[in-house]
Amino acid sequence: MRTEELKNNWNLVVKEFSQRFGDGEEMDLDGILFIIGVQEVGLGFKRYKKNEKVDLIHVAICRLLEPYGYYKFEGMDEQSWPHYEPTAKLPFLKAGEQTLLIKDAIVTYCLDNEWI
């Protein structure tokens, strides 16, 4: 995705997530990842423990990077949490490059799910 197109689509994602889930506050990247994790696990909104929040963000990252060939979905465990297997080593990326990759993956995910 071109940089300008990514920027515009990312702004749409932030606006949509902020309106739906941000209680009037602009959501950040981690908040959006958390919401995607909740969506993927399918347990709905409730109070999550800190370690569960970290796990939900991890699920989101695995799901988002699956189409890029970095993870493969393995199945659900007995608590209905999805599990992924790494399939390729992530390339070394600078912090800004990591952020762009994740934002691109989130935009693609949102477009695929018709959220934006």
Image (spheres, helix red, strand yellow):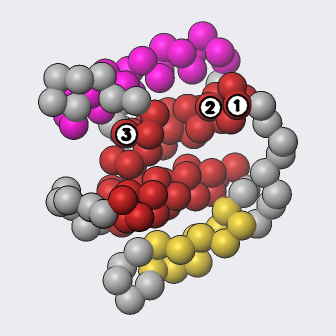
Amino acid at dot 2 = Thr
Residue under the image location 27 percent in, 61 percent down:
48
Q: Is residue 25 above or below residue 61?
A: above
Percent position (x, y) of residue 45? 19, 56
Left of 37 or right of it: where is 102? right
Do the residues bearing badges 2 and 1 touch, measured as CB atoms within 8 Å?
Answer: yes
Name the kind of residue labelled 1 in the image.
Ala
Give residue 49's quadrant in the image: bottom left
Image mark for residue 95:
1
Q: Which residues are magenta?
A: 2-21
| As drawn, 10 above or below 83 | above
Which circle marks residue 31 in the picture?
A: 3
Queried whether the magenta region covers residue 113, the answer comes back as no
Q: Quadrant of the N terminus?
A: top right
Asked if 40 appears above or below 3 in the picture, the reply is below
* Distance (Cα) linking label 2 and label 3: 14 Å
